[in-house]
Image: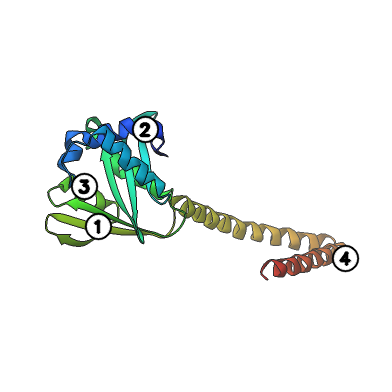
């Protein structure tokens, strides 16, 4: 299933309102009222003024199927997610939240408010690694601290793989060095002296980088 998320644009305004006003979204929202287009436009203008607020449209291939919203409040973002009714209960919300993690380049505290009657969303956040903070009346609060983006974690995994390969390659290099010394001792000494001299220059340059 090809799930992706893309930043909201003004061309998505009507779609955003459509998903917000669908029955399942309203039933699971603290505000169950149908939002009027004029009111939604005014809210959206205020929302997008704060650059820390984010909205991502969820896509299945090239088809819009929902959204994720991040409301910045002082030191954290409050997350809400809504999926088109035709695509609910297919694991799309969980995959969309994994895509969201890739967008985080710094440590982030994410909090979500879920109605205690919304069992599917409670299961979603638990499976996504969120911790239950507390319950306030009919609302359950979840939180998660993202320390690294998924793309960074993948990069670190690749670096670890490179390290493993380099260790094996170092053994190969030493085998070649032994063979060279056995074949022509004097010439090998001259070559090794040049290598050692270059390494010293690299070390000096490396020290300049760390200053």
Q: Is residue 36 above or below residue 193?
A: above
- Contact? badges 2 and 1 (CB < 8 Å): no
Gap in angstroms between the C-alphas marked 3 and 4: 73 Å
Q: Nearer the viewer, mark 2 or mark 3?
A: 2
Instruction: Judge left or right: residue 159 versus residue 72.
Output: right
- Sequence-wise first label, 4 or 2: 2
- Mark drawn on residue 142: 1
- Does the CB distance between marks 4 and 2 fall below 8 Å? no
Q: Position of residue 59 (x, y in %)?
A: 36, 34
Q: Earlier in the sequence, mark 1 or mark 4?
A: 1
Per the image, the residue denoted by label 3 is: 121
> Helix, strand or loop at disc 1?
strand
Q: Nearer the viewer, mark 2 or mark 1?
A: 2
Tell me the residue that label 4 is attached to. Answer: 186
For marks 3 and 1, give the CA distance.
Answer: 11 Å
Nearest-to-viewer mark from 3 and 4 = 3
Q: Position of residue 85 (x, y in %)?
A: 22, 32
| Cα distance in 3D space between marks 2 and 1 | 28 Å
Q: Are marks 1 and 4 in contact (CB under 8 Å)?
A: no
Locate the C terminus by quadrant.
bottom right
């Amino acid at each position: 299933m090809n799930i992706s998320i893309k930043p909201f644009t003004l061309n998505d305004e009507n779609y955003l309102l459509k998903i917000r006003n669908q029955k399942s979204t309203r039933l699971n929202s603290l505000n169950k009222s149908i939002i009027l287009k004029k009111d939604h436009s005014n809210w959206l203008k205020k929302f997008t003024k704060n650059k820390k607020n984010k909205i991502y449209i969820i896509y299945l291939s090239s088809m819009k199927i929902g959204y994720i919203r991040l409301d910045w409040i002082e030191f954290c973002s409050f997350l809400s997610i809504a999926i088109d009714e035709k695509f609910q209960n297919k694991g799309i919300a969980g995959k969309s939240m994994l895509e969201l993690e890739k967008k985080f380049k710094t440590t982030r505290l994410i909090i979500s408010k879920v109605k205690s009657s919304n069992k599917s969303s409670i299961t979603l956040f638990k499976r996504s690694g969120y911790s239950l903070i507390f319950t306030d009346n009919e609302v359950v609060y979840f939180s998660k601290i993202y320390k690294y983006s998924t793309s960074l974690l993948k990069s670190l995994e690749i670096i670890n793989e490179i390290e493993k390969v380099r260790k094996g390659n170092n053994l190969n290099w030493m085998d070649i060095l032994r063979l060279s010394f056995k074949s022509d001792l004097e010439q090998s000494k001259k070559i090794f002296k040049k290598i050692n001299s270059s390494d010293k220059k690299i070390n000096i340059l490396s020290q300049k980088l760390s200053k």
